[in-house]
Image (spheres, rainbow, N blue to C red):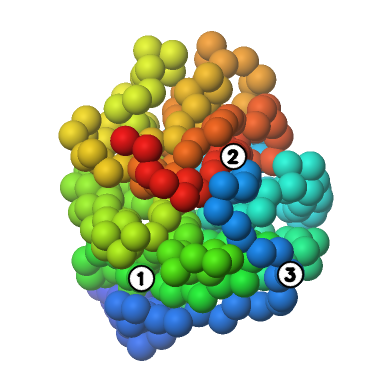
Amino acid sequence: MKKSVKIFLVIMLAIIVILLILFAILMLTEYKPKDVEQLNVEGNATKVLNLEEKVKILTYNIGYLSLDKTQDFFLDGGTSVRPKTNENVLKNLDGVNEIIASQNPDICLLQEVDLKAKRSYYINEYEKISEKFNGTSTFSMYHRCLCIPYPIFNMVGYVEAGMTTLNKYNNVSTRIALPSAYSFPMKQVMFKRNLLKQVIDIKDSYKKLVVFNLHLEAYDDGGVRLKQLNILKDEILKEYEKGNYVIAGGDFNQTFPVVDNKKYPVLDDNNFVANVIPSDFIGKNLKYAIDDSLPTCRLLNKPYSGNYQDTQLYVLDGFIVTNNVKINEVKVIDTNFEYTDHQPVLLDFTLQSEEVE
């Protein structure tokens, strides 16, 4: 009996020591970006931005090319961490590249892009997508961890991930940190959310076009998302007050007051439920560019059946723009969730030489 107790205690002590070593390593290697950082802009762009001409911008959360219609996800009520083989990732890569090429946007905002990660079989998605785009590319890290140690028997493992903005116009890019939803010990392994800001010159104008790529918090109680949203608003208005044109697009991880949410009812409130952005949030100088005719996201509690009726659906992706930006058209591109759990949103806009109230 005493021997059994000793063996048990030794095993427990060994587990504790291993966990302490793991947390020490994670603390020492924790990704700690500055509040504001200049980002590298790779490639060259030849297009010139003019006032009063149509421009297209696309936002697309690509789910690190591993969350296609055949997949579920453990944090959404499913069980999976990654596809069984890298064939899914490569197929989804081709599909996403085809969508970008077919829509031919001037600016493309991508979220959940893996630089190097176990969950996507260490494929450099940023490189594979950027090389197909005729323009500049910028990567902004928001998740880097040596090992995400859960689920315990099928760990997420190594992750380097972030957002990518592809641009046919030359630009200056900046990373602006957002507040975190996590404290110790989760802080060491979770997201370091940020805004990827790009400033683009306009021909024969002192004004600039400022574009924000964003992916806000997902699994908090909504309070941190609202803080992040308020920082975004402050950044937008700061640029607008300079006379600039501003577009902010991406995955808001919350729905919009202009969306008819009766189209996408909550089927099961035990999983992710989308908060609604407060109705008075944007004020008089901003407006939404949203299309709710189709959902932009599905819940990953199970593989996609192809049927809206038994799938939890949301409108989480879209744009906020300043009043000097004319919205010509905004539409969700129907991909039937083939390559990721999101659908892309395309905005056709014009920078107005004179603002129309």
Residue ID at (76%, 61%)? 133
Which of the two discs, 2 and 1, labels the residue nearer the N terminus?
Answer: 1
As helix, strand or loop, the secondary structure at mark 2 comes to strand
Instruction: Indicate the amino acid at tag 3.
Output: Thr
Instruction: Indicate the amino acid at tag 1.
Output: Ile
Identify the mark at residue 96; answer none if there is no mark: none
Residue ID at (62%, 72%)? 170
Q: Quadrant of residue 126?
A: bottom right
Q: With respect to residue 265, does 192 lie above or below? A: below
Q: Quadrant of the C terminus?
A: top left
Q: Is residue 192 left or right of residue 208?
A: left
List the residue tagged with mark 2: 348
Instruction: Indicate the amino acid at tag 2.
Output: Asp
Dot 3: few (<14), some (14–19), or many (≥20) neighbours within 10 Å? few
72 or 326, nearer to the observer: 326
Q: Disc 3 to disc 1, how far (Cα)?
A: 27 Å
List the residue tagged with mark 3: 46
Q: Nearer the viewer, mark 2 or mark 1?
A: 2
* x, y percent for residue 350: 54, 44
* x, y percent for residue 310: 53, 15
* x, y percent for residue 296: 53, 32
Identify the mark at residue 176; answer none if there is no mark: 1
As helix, strand or loop, the secondary structure at mark 3 comes to loop
